[in-house]
Image: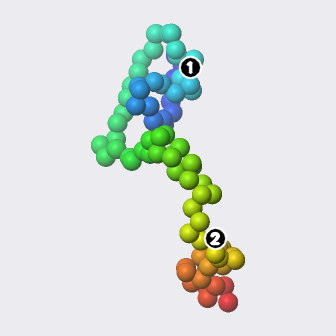
Amino acid sequence: MKAIEQDVVISAKGRLPAAFQEAFGRKVRVIILIEEEAESVESPDTSAQLMGLAGKISAFRHMDDPVAVQRAWRGVEELEK
């Protein structure tokens, strides 16, 4: 007997990931373990919406060196000296 085991998130439509394609159309034994405290999973729609904003927010465009500003905020420059 061969086992296929993966940590996956089943889509809201209830479809199995392609990694289980070998089992499609075959007799299989399915074991589902759900953790008591479910992890928060970001929906694909939210991810797509966030990616749609990439490069469009201009809140920090006035900064010549945003990385240097972030380091100053974190106090990293003081630690490096």
Instruction: Indicate the quadrant where residue 32 lies.
Output: top left
- Relative to 16, is 55 on the left or the right? right
Name which residue lies at 57% across and 17% down. Answer: 22
Viewer-nearest residue: 18 or 63: 63
Amino acid found under the numbered disc labelled 1: Gln
| Contact between labelled residues 1 and 2, with CB atoms less than 8 Å apart | no
Question: Which mark, residue 8?
Answer: none
| Mark 2 Cα-neighbour bin, 10 Å: few <14, some 14–19, many ≥20 | few
**In which quadrant is the C terminus drawn?**
bottom right
In the rendered image, residue 14, in percent from the top left (x then y), is placed at 41, 25
Q: Earlier in the sequence, mark 2 or mark 1?
A: 1
Relative to 69, say whether 81 is above or below: below
Q: Name the residue located 60 percent from the left edge and 58 percent from the top edge.
A: 56
Residue pointed to by mark 2: 61
Q: How far is the residue under mark 2 from the one under mark 1?
A: 46 Å
> Residue 61 or 26: which is nearer the viewer?
61
Q: According to the image, label 1 marks what residue?
A: 21
